[in-house]
Image: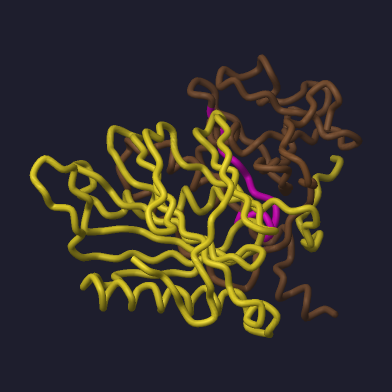
Amino acid sequence: MSEDNPLPDWPDETEAVDLSESSAVESIPVAELAAKVLDEDVEDRRYINVVDLLHKLPQGPAILALSDGVTNHYVTSTGFSVEGRIYWIYYQDPWGPKRGSFLQKGKNIAGVEARPVEGKPGAWAITHEEMMRVLDSSIVVDGAKKRRGDRSSES
Amino acid sequence: MARRSAGAIGPVKAEIEYEQTSEGIIALVSVGQARFSFRVGKHPTGTSEPQGAYLWSVEESGRQHIVQMVLTPVAQGAIQSAVPHDAILISHMNWETEFQQQRLGRKMVRSGLGIFPTGEPYLQWSMEGKIGGSGDGETKATGYSSHATTFHDGIIVLLGIQGLGAGWEDPSLLDLKCWRAMLSLFRHSSVLKLPFLTPKPEAT
């Protein structure tokens, strides 16, 4: 993470970790069911949609359709980690390292402030709360990464 | 209501602190070695602790609901056995739902096994049936309620959502609130033993 944007503090004894792949347990379709409820609970739905994205990411990169209410944009998310109560979601912006990212401070009107990932040109990270403000939909890039079953059969 | 189940001792008391965040009020819960937090809601208006269950009254999205938390420690022998944690959760859910059916005449109408993004399992189930407290002038609780449990450091954490008053005609709304509460639960401990398998961002 950039030193200009220090990560928020969390009470003692908490470490940042990378996350495991989803277990073999089949998940209940929370996002599918959440889509059926009333629009007035839009914040709950947005949270569920972001969690649904986190469930997808161990399968491979996902294309994210983003919007700040005025501008639409697409990025590719590559993974996430957790720190305290925050899921950090990583993505590559097609604008490239020179132009920066649509989700950088001042380049969107949703108030999102993406942090560059050190040593990873073109890679950015935002919190799950920020993602709730801009995520419209997501789709896993099919075949971009072999599924777990395929990998285990290779060994 | 006394609560007990095979292999479990409980309920237990917890130390709870609160933190205001952009997502709403977060409860920071400590009980023994177990430390976790979850989102209570935007506007909690009160809290109580009757008979071992922590209750918060919350106003959100123009409706009222109750958030319930019950913490049940599992006997050490059960934790050390080879029984998977999801099996412990399912056993606890079976006891809880049978208890409610026998004592309160309520029945389970739906259940499912879910996973956190971190890979840990949780169970979600819904109950239907009459709830007490039907005096005139009272804000009536919905007959439908949604519950979810997970297992953390020897503690079964049960979160429940019960609607209050009008606006809960669609039961899915209560399930959504329950998922949101459970999926907002973060485990905090000094040692987090998770495999490192998530794809890392790579340079283009």
Q: What's the residue at 33%, 51% (across, down)?
A: B174
Q: Residue furthest bottom?
A: B82
Side of A79 relative to B108 (left or right) = right
The location of residue B87, given as percent across then percent down, is 55, 79
Quadrant containing the N terminus of chain B is: bottom left
Q: What's the residue at 66%, 58% (across, down)?
A: B32
Q: Is residue B104 above or below residue B183?
A: below
**The hue in which chain B appears in the rendered picture of the protein:** yellow
The location of residue B160, given as percent across then percent down, is 40, 56
The location of residue B157, given as percent across then percent down, is 53, 61
**The hue in which chain A appears in the rendered picture of the protein:** brown
Q: Which residues are magenta?
A: A55-67
Q: Nearer the viewer, residue A80 or B49?
A: B49
Q: Is residue B81 above or below residue A34?
A: below
Question: Which image quarter: residue A124?
Answer: top right
Q: In the image, is residue B101 part of the stretch drawn in magenta?
A: no
